[in-house]
Image (cartoon, rainbow, N blue to C red):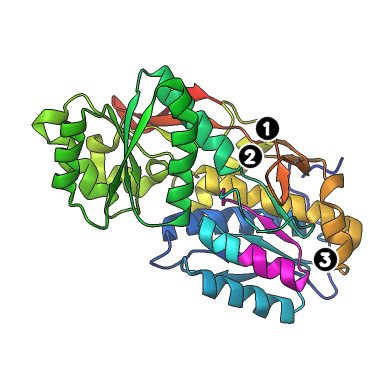
Amino acid sequence: MNAPPTARTTERTDGPSVRVGALAPLTPPGWAEAGRHLLAGLQLAARDVNESGGIGGRPLELVVRDTAADPRRAAAAVDECARLGVAAMAGEYHSVVARAAATRADALGVPFLCSSAVLDALTDQPTEWVARLPPPQSRGWRVYADFLLGAGHRRIAVAADASVYWASGTRVLREHLAPRGGTVLELDMRALTPTAVCDALADHRATALLLLVGHPEPAVSIVRTVRRHQRLAGIMLGAPAGQPEFAAWATLLGADGAGVPFLRYLPERLGPLGIRVETALRGQLAEPPSFVAFEGYDTITVLADVLRRTHGTDRARTAASWPDVAVDGTRGQIRFSRTPGINVWQWAGPPVHVVDRDPAAPDRFRIRHVG
């Protein structure tokens, strides 16, 4: 097993660099805050890799490209990085964008380790070239549905934008809730104002509203409007996609943003490596790191392990090494396997929790349910 060092050591790295393409949404309309955290994790891990000898004595170099949440831009970035001779691709946060990158990487024969996108159908066909760290949406959102049921919610509404990702999440919720007596009311945010959403919630006697929409808007406006609506005093707001994880949520909403449960892929307690990485990321970001930053760190940790065994020169050998991975990451040991219904190599063991910001202290997170 090849684990990252628990303390930094410095060894000489020289010779031509081993390049890894790094995709992240760094500008709007992408979720730039998530992209910044993802990139911070990728960069910190790359520094740690180089300080411990690089890839067979050669430095690891990130070739960073901003996807701006644009699938076409992501596919073009994979093309460019392939021409530049990258050994592998890494990263991306938005699921639809990661799908475009994975599809292109598969077509070009470039290994791609997806850091933070959960859409089940990351590729249309089974592929040996793509692996993924976060849990597939069908697993995470079923955990969220179990949380809703355990909290006594059976009449669920979703305020949803038009997106393959949101539609997939709604389908997972409906299929899991329906046999257990739950219903899901879809509210199309292309046609409704936040006030109209509140009226529909009251008319249908929904007990929970899930925000399947972009952040900051329309999510922030919906939260503020619901919190002030007289007929909705007892309704629970939820955001399974994780909008409340980031500092901007608390900054924009304050107390209104507390008590909004979301999915988080961190363990209840970090081990020694996770604690060290958390400290370094906090200094790098000047704020507490999100789970997305840890996903970025683990991505490069895994790729470094694989590239050291293949010397970073043979893409086919790199892709063939996914089933041999056994790496201690910040959130547990990472191994890839084939999961039924998933076309890429999948880490089956990432932690899945439902958490929220504590109304008594919005900067503190509470675990509400363990998946």
Q: Secondary structure at mark 2?
A: helix
| Residue with the mark numbered 3 | 13
Q: Residue at x 43, y 39 (%)?
A: 240
In magenta stretch: residue 225: no
**Distance CA(mark 1)–CA(mark 2):** 6 Å
3D distance between C-alphas at marks 2 and 3: 23 Å
Q: Secondary structure at mark 3?
A: loop
Q: Are marks 1 and 2 in contact (CB under 8 Å)?
A: yes
Between disc 2 and disc 3, whose residue precedes? Answer: 3
| Front one among 66 and 144 | 144
Q: Quadrant of the C terminus?
A: top right
- Segment colored magenta: 101-118
Res. 348 mark: none
Magenta segment includes 102: yes
User: Dot 2, how many residues are within 10 Å of its Cα: few (below 14), some (14-19), or many (20+)?
Assistant: some
Q: Quadrant of residue 228?
A: top left
Secondary structure under tag 1 reads helix
Q: Which mark is residue 276?
A: 2
Task: From the top left corner, tell me how far across and down residue 109 is, in percent.
Answer: 78, 69
Label 1 close to label 3 by CB (< 8 Å) = no
Check disc 1 and report the residue beneath it.
272
Is residue 301 in view from this perspective? yes
Amino acid of disc 2: Arg
Estimate how packed mark 1 is, as few (under 14), some (14 to 19) or many (20 or more) residues with alpha carbons within 10 Å. Answer: few
Q: Can residue 52 be seen by looking at this rendering?
A: no
Q: Indicate the position of residue 369 as horizontal and vertical percent values.
A: 48, 23
Q: In the displayed structure, does residue 20 sit left or right of residue 161?
A: right
User: Mark 3 belongs to which amino acid?
Assistant: Thr
Quarter of the picture holding the N terminus: top right
Along the viewing direction, whichever of 134 and 21 lies nearer the viewer: 134
